[in-house]
Structure formats: structure tokens, C-alpha cells
Image (tube, grey):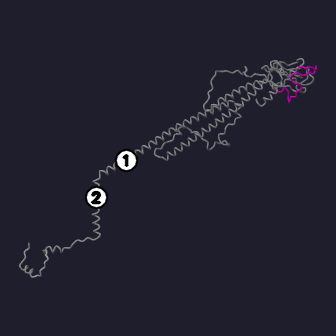
Amino acid sequence: MLRRSPSQYRDDCSRPHDSRVRPPAQLRRAETRPQLRLGPIAFWIVTGTLVVLAVWTIITGTYFAFREDVLAKLIARHAEMQFAYEDRIAELRAQIDRFSSRQLIDQEAYEKKLEQILRRQAALESRASALNGLGDITGAIRQPARGGSSGEPRANAPKPARDKGAMVIPLDRGSDSRTGILAKSAGGVGGAIERLLASLDRLEKRQAAMVGSMAENYDAKARRIRGVLAELGLDLGKPSGDGAVGGPFVPAHMTKEAPGFEPQLNRIQTARAQIARITRTLGTLPVRKPVDGDIELQSGFGVRTDPFLGTPAMHTGLDLHGETGDPVRATADGTVVAAGWSGGYGRVVDIDHHNGLSTRYAHLSSIDVRVGQSIKSGQIVGKIGSTGRSTGPHLHYETRLKGEPVDPQKFLRAAERLDGTL
């Protein structure tokens, strides 16, 4: 504690009294020191810093308080995203597997269709070969054009695949656009195959219709010939000895692609065989005219008045007008069995045509054949004359069936009916 001197004490007493308490000198000296004052900018900087520190303190405290929950949520979110990606990958793999299976199924379907096309093509070629074997009818069949009228193939004509490998479509697992392109390509191949199958269907239908029409024509022709021969009293239902046939019975194989083709073809072959046999027989039927030019009938077959006696008499042939020396021709193939003079017939030629048929040419002025000679239809056997019991130049022509005279006009009319049939 500071001590005051007596002089200081007197001075204090002599001064006017101040009731205020004065601090010590040391304190007064402390109060007179300079003070720190802050400007507005510094104030706001300090304030902002304090606010940031406060916020950071709050966030840090919150983080440490809720750190476990945040980590758990982040881990759960990550796991959820991982599961979602795995599910998406599994779905894509399933789609790829389904597409691969579909492609495999489509490939098998294409191969089956291609095999069907090849099988049907082979059947068409086999049937075409069978039609070619018919010989005389295939030349009149116009083959269907493969292209346009110029003979070149059509630009949009479907073409078969070169091999099975060409139909394998590669699968790109990572490109949806490539998958779409491949699907379009597969659709294009499938469309081409379908168009080719439709074309084969139309070809088979046309072929079947054509064969059916030919079968009807041959059946009608065979029926017409059989009807004519039946009117002549001839039965050609059984094959002759010259055309003997036989062999073991083997059932015919009918294809599924065109079940109506083989029966129609069999009808054609049967009718052609009958017509061929009948044609060979017709070569021995007296259906040709025995004289050249138009026939001028002077006396018909049957009962008439005898030109010499004037009484009814049976005329067993036809008297055909002609001039002396006009050629007389054989009306069918055969063998001469008589050639010479025969009573009222004068000079006569008899020809045996087999099948019980024979023809006679009488009143000839000359004979150009000999007994035993083979004669062809249309061959000259003599000349018209007036030998024997005759009133003038003419040809007496007879046809006989099993020795009995029949009207020759039946055979001549049959020739007119068969004209254009054979």
C-alpha cells in the first residue's frame, strides 16, 4: 500500500472537496490506454466465420450422431441397385435364350420346309418323267414358263437356298438393333419359302388338272372306239395272243403330295393300252374305202330284184361304181386266200383279215396279187372290170364275219366315226 507524505496530505486538504472517489493513479493510467475497435467488414467476416463454425459443428455432430443410419441406407441402396442390375441381366439372358430357341425352332422349320420342297420337286420330276413316257401326248403339252415371255427368269422369283448352312442366322447378344435386322432377314427367307411352296402348289394343281383332262380325253376316245366296234359285232375286251402281257401284282404307291395324280396317270396308261391294242386291231378291220374318190353306190346290201331274173334275191355286198381299169384297194391288212376266177363273181380276190373278218373283191378285170401274199391296207389288189355275172363295169365288194356276209357300210360308217379319233 502506498504511503503518503504529510505534504501531500495537506495539499489534498487544501483543495476543494470532491465527493467522488478517485481511483488510484495506476488505475487512471490503465484507463488512458488505447482501445481496439473493429470495422463493418471485419465484423461480418468474424460473424460469418462464427456462423460457419457453428453450422459445421452442428453438421459434424449430426453426422456422428446418425452416421450408422446413413451408412446402412447407402449400403441398402447399393445392394438394391446391384440386385436390379442382376435382375436386368437375367432378363436379358432369358430373352437371348428365348430368341435363340426361337431361331433354332425357325431353323428346324426352314429345314423341314426345304426338305418338303425338295421332296415335292422330286415328285414333280418323277411325274414329269412319267408323262414323258407317254410319248405321243407329251409333245402337245406346253411346259410352264419359268420366267417371263422372253425366257429369262423373273426378277422377283423365289430361289431355293444353296445349302442348309446358308439358313443359319448368327445371334449377336449385345445388340438389339442387330437382332431386329436378323429377325427381318429371317422373315424374308421365310416369305421366300412360303412363296415357293405356293408356287409348287399351283404347279401341282395345274399338272393334276392337265393329267385329269388327258385321262378324260383318253377314256372318251376308248369308249367311242369300243362303242363303234360293238356296233360292228366285234368284242375286243380281251387282249389278243399277239399282245400277251403278265407279271406279278405289285400295288402302286400313291404319293401324299398329289394323291390324284397316280390314279389319273393309271387311267391314261390303261386307256392308251386299250387304244393301242384297238388300233392294232383296227388295222385288220375293213374300214378303208376300196375305191379312190367318193363312193357311188349302185346297189346296196340285202334283198333286191335280181338284174337277170327279175326276182327277189339276196345281195351279199355292195356294187360300187367305177370305170374299167380303176384301181381296187384292200380295205385292211391281211393275207390273200383266193385270187382267180370264181363262177358268177368272175375274177375275184379274197383277203383274210383275221379276227374272223374277210373281204371279197369281185368282177375284176385283172388281179395284181397272189394267194398267200401279205397285203397292207390301201394296197392295189386288182382293177375294176365286168367279169362274171355282171351288167357293166363296177366293183362288187363284200365283208364277211366268221363266214357270214355283213353289210360293208357298217365298216365304212365306222371309219367315218373313227376319223380323227385315232
Q: Image point 17% across, 73% down: which residue? A: 31
Q: x, y (%) of residue 369?
A: 84, 21
Please give left or right for residue 143 compared with residue 20 in the image.
right
Q: Is residue 301 magenta?
A: yes
Instruction: Report if residue 383 is visible in the image.
Output: no
Quadrant location, the C terminus: top right
Question: Which residue range is magenta in the image?
Answer: 288-313
Q: Which residue is mark 1?
A: 80
Occupied quadrant, residue 232: top right
Occupied quadrant, residue 362: top right
Q: x, y (%) of residue 378?
A: 82, 26
Q: Image point 79% across, 29% down: which residue? A: 417
Please give left or right for residue 47 compared with residue 388 in the image.
left
Q: x, y (%) of residue 24?
A: 12, 74
Secondary element under disc 2, as helix, strand or loop, is helix
Secondary element under disc 1, as helix, strand or loop, is helix
Q: Which residue is mark 2?
A: 58
Please give left or right for residue 144 compared with residue 301 in the image.
left
Please give left or right for residue 342 compared with residue 146 in the image.
right
